Image (cartoon, rainbow, N blue to C red):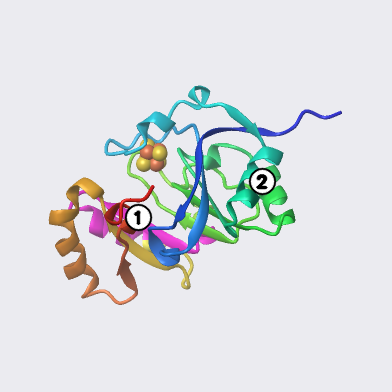
């Protein structure tokens, strides 16, 4: 008998997607442990060490997702693309679930995804091969210079890729007006707010 595929799972929970094009969509989130990107403002630094999180079998992960009643499964991290995600997405799709991922693009992307959120980070470069796979580009704005940095990434994604700027949570008061001014002059860009944080859900 083959060994079941397992992943380090930091947490999994039912919530509502708070960011980007699918804002407001009830979703089951799976946060995989492990990240080597190292963003200074990371709000889930406890995810970085993959050995700090118990491994779960794909079968258990799918069963939990089905139990949640959600039809959309968002795989996030950490940096989930550090792993071969093909077994996970194959099992989720076989169960009739939609597969979404949030990745920095710093690792080759594996798996079968209905929606790819690419959120490149300054701390580890996005691989060129990941840009064309993105359905949405979501750049977190920590500093004013991140606005033009985001525009540079937009040159590499597909024409139909949706583009979002999202104020880093602790900088939202100063950066939200900056973003609003910037997108007002650049058709095709939208603001993404972390609406789950505004309404106090995970
Ligand atoms: S890629 Fe995500 S999890 Fe990793 S350090 Fe950056 S914000 Fe944190």
- Residue corresponding to mark 2: 62
**Secondary structure under the numbered disc 2 in the rendered image:** helix
Above or below, 189 against 97 in this view is below
The crowd level at tag 2 (other Cα within 10 Å; few <14, some 14-19, many 20+) is many
In the visual, does 143 lie left or right of 66?
Answer: left
Q: Where does ligand 1 appear, by image quarter?
A: top left
In the visual, does 108 lie left or right of 66?
Answer: left
Above or below, 184 against 153 in this view is below
In the visual, does 50 lie left or right of 149?
Answer: right
> Disc 1 to disc 2, how far (Cα)?
24 Å
Q: Position of residue 14 (x, y in %)?
A: 50, 50
Give whichever of discs 1 and 2 has the lower sequence position: 2
- Quick check: can you spot residue 124? no
The residue stretch that appears in magenta: 132-153
Mark number, residue 41: none
Whether label 1 touches label 2, CB < 8 Å: no
**Secondary structure under the numbered disc 1 in the rendered image:** helix
In the visual, does 145 lie left or right of 115?
Answer: left
Q: Position of residue 186 (x, y in %)?
A: 26, 74
Image quadrant occupied by the N terminus: top right
What residue is rendered at 51% in x and 56% in y?
Answer: 27
Find out whether residue 143 is within the magenta segment: yes
- Residue corresponding to mark 1: 196
Q: Position of residue 145 (x, y in %)?
A: 20, 53
């Amino acid at each position: 008998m083959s060994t079941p595929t397992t992943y380090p799972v930091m947490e999994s929970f039912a919530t509502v997607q708070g960011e980007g094009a699918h804002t407001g969509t009830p979703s089951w989130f799976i946060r995989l442990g492990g990240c080597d990107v190292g963003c200074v403002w990371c709000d889930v630094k406890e995810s970085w060490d993959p050995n700090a999180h118990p491994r779960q079998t794909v079968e258990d992960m799918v069963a939990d997702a089905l139990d949640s009643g959600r039809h959309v499964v968002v795989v996030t991290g950490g940096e989930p693309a550090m792993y071969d995600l093909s077994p996970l997405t194959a099992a989720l799709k076989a169960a009739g679930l939609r597969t979404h991922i949030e990745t920095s693009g710093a690792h080759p992307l594996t798996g079968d995804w209905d929606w790819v959120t690419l959120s490149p980070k300054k701390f580890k470069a996005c691989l060129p091969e990941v840009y064309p796979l993105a359905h949405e580009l979501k750049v977190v704005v920590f500093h004013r210079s991140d606005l033009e940095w985001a525009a540079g990434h937009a040159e590499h994604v597909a024409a139909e890729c949706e583009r979002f700027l999202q104020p880093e949570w602790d900088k939202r008061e100063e950066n939200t007006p900056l973003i609003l001014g910037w997108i007002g002059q650049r058709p095709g860009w939208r603001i993404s707010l972390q609406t789950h944080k505004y309404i106090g859900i995970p």
